Amino acid sequence: MMNLLEAHDIESYFDIRGGLFGRIQSYVKAVNGVSLNVGEGEIVSVVGESGCGKSTLGLALLGLQKIRSGSLSFQGESINVNDFKSWQGLRKDLQIIFQDPYTSLNPRLTIYESLSEPLLLHGICKKSELKDKVGYLLEQVELKPEMMDRFPHSFSGGQRQRICIARVLGIEPKLIVCDEIVSALDVSVQAQILELLLKLKESHNLSLLFISHDLAVVRAISRRIYVMYLGRVVEEGPSEMLFHQPKHPYTKALLDSIPTLDRSRRPVLLEGEVPSPTNLPTGCAFASRCKYKSEKCGELPQRSGLDDQSYYCHNPLN
Amino acid sequence: MGKLLEAKNLSIALPEDGGQVILTEGISFDIQKGEVYSLVGESGCGKTITALSLLNVLPTANASMLTGEVLFNDQDLLKLPEKDLCKIRGKDIAVIFQEPSSAMNPLMKVRAQLEECYLLHQLEVNHEAIDLMLKEVGFADPERVLNSYPHELSGGMLQRVMIAMALLLKPKLIIADEPTTALDVTIQAQIMDLLDRLRREHDVSILLITHNLNLVAQYSDRVAVMYAGRMVEEAGVEEFFAKPCHPYSKGLLRALPKMGSAVSTLEPIQGQVPLPKNFVPSCRFADRCSQVVESQCCSAPIAFKEVGPQHKVACVLEQK
């Protein structure tokens, strides 16, 4: 399988300004050296708690967030990350669906207008064919074409998320970043959207980068997972192995804190303070909450493990 | 144990275009002392509005029509004058709202908002109790939190402040409306653990409103499933997860992504929840139900009947 998107050591910081002249005083290290790849036709997930930098990473990979350093390549060709023009050429191939279907559709545009805008912008089809194309797209996401003249407010959350999917689908992208696209939805609707996404992925040969904090959802949809903690990847690997034999204590803690239907297995609590992202420790960022920490944890752990499952920990679990 | 609160035949309607739209109807349940009772259902099924109606704090209190009875301490809360209700709200029955960021006053420091709990009930402010409660909900440094404005705290922290606020006056019943929906799993585990501990140590009853069935399985004693403004199933938690009866409950359980299973074994419930203006008198789940029997399901209202000990279902298939 060829790698569609390859990212190396991506860093993306937010400036904290203050003082009289608004000088930069420090940084929030949102993404702090992340490497990641997405294969063609693959669904890859990034999981982590809020504030771990997963959404910033998603935006950075699309050029929507400034990348401080690191390299990116798409379909084997490297992208000049700080050049707006080089991103422009990729907009058609790299797309994103946002978390909140309520705010990502313009309330004053009909569905037809919202869906036809990107089609015209990218020259996908002629004006005369627009109606048919929009109707076709709505059918693809299992909505009725006659809904195209309605406004977003008359749709439910699940339907709006379908519309957002249809909008992205129209310009036939190669990679779609899905940023928490089901976390605002009910379980039954969640399942509908995930099923639809898997179906479309097959029929349109899409690659997906799925960003979520919900491990059960991630497990249901992807084969490979990256776990992030405070700006860094702490573990990556096939979902099967990550869920059954996590190596990093943080992955294990995440898995243990999920409530399940099994009443004999109580969620386990994670103790300790989370370090501030403006003032990260020099060593392992998870050490302050880790049960297995040792003196070595004052140093940044190197990548270890086999090819498909790797982790960044001095005291990995067996 | 004993009954702490009993809701009888609660119905809520909103006036619209000269007529009225019925949001919920015939909701009856009771909450025992020290019990966690869960209300589950999809958004729009009426679970939040049912909970809010218990304290008569519906968003459009004047325009909405609320009928039924809410018995608490031998009095009907719905008939109580506003003045007396205010004495119960926040003191005997407290609410943890869904969105902490919009439930708190952005212009007041956390300290003032917590002190308000006492002041509103003409009690002397107990600073020690405030400190203690904040420690209880997991703040190592209460002073810093007290001196912050809501925007200076994260969602998880605000949610914990809300919980501290709700618990401050040691209520007998806590209505927790999706208390952890906006939070990460790790913080969710902390908060649920705290609520569970309070329940055990202080004998508090909790009405947990959620759409997360995993949480229900872990923390509650009894569960009621709502669909389109009606209760469709009520049972003890163990019974419910072992033997769900209503096709909608079964569907919800199947739609849940499971940790143990690999790529996609999800089974969504097809179709959509009807809008209140399209509610029919017969079974409202019929058009999405795979086992529908047209002649019985689509003609008359379905009774909410007992099918086992403490197990009620509104489905013709189970009531033979």
Image (cartoon, coloured by chain):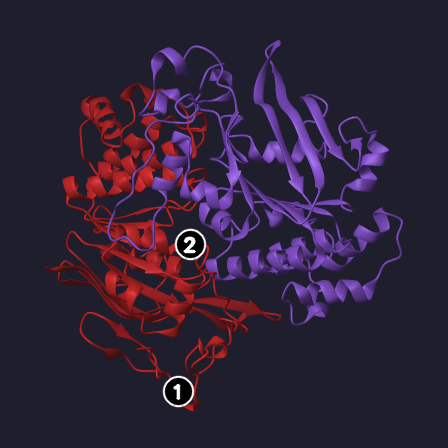
Chain colours: A red, B purple
Looking at the picture, does residue A19 appear above or below residue A189? below
For numbered disc 2, what is the local secondary structure? loop
The amino acid sitting under disc 1 is Glu
Q: Are marks 1 and 2 in contact (CB under 8 Å)?
A: no
Question: What residue lies at 48% left-to-right and 57% top-to-bottom?
Answer: B184
Q: Is residue B182 left or right of residue B242?
A: right
Question: What residue lies at 32% left-to-right and 24% top-to-bottom?
Answer: B291
* Residue matched to label 2: A262
Label 1 to label 2: alpha-carbon separation: 39 Å
Residue A127 horizontal/vertical position (percent): 21, 25
Q: Chain of mark 2?
A: A
Q: Quadrant of the N terminus of chain A?
A: bottom left
Looking at the picture, does residue B319 appear above or below residue B310? above
Q: Is residue B112 left or right of residue B198?
A: right
Q: Nearer the viewer, residue B247 or A38?
A: B247
The single residue placed furthest to the bottom in the displayed view is: A295
Front: mark 1 or 2: 2
Q: Chain of mark 1?
A: A
Question: What residue lies at 42% left-to-right and 54% top-to-bottom?
Answer: A262
The amino acid sitting under disc 2 is Asp
Q: Is residue B15 left or right of residue B284?
A: right
* Residue matched to label 1: A299
Looking at the picture, does residue A118 appear above or below residue A68? above
- Mark sitting earlier along the chain (1/2): 2
Residue A74 horizontal/vertical position (percent): 18, 59
Question: What residue lies at 65% left-to-right and 72% top-to-bottom?
Answer: B140
Q: Nearer the viewer, residue A270 or A229?
A: A270
Residue A143 numbered tag: none
For numbered disc 1, what is the local secondary structure? loop
Q: Quadrant of the C terminus of chain A?
A: bottom left
Residue A72 horizontal/vertical position (percent): 23, 65
Residue B187 horizontal/vertical position (percent): 52, 60
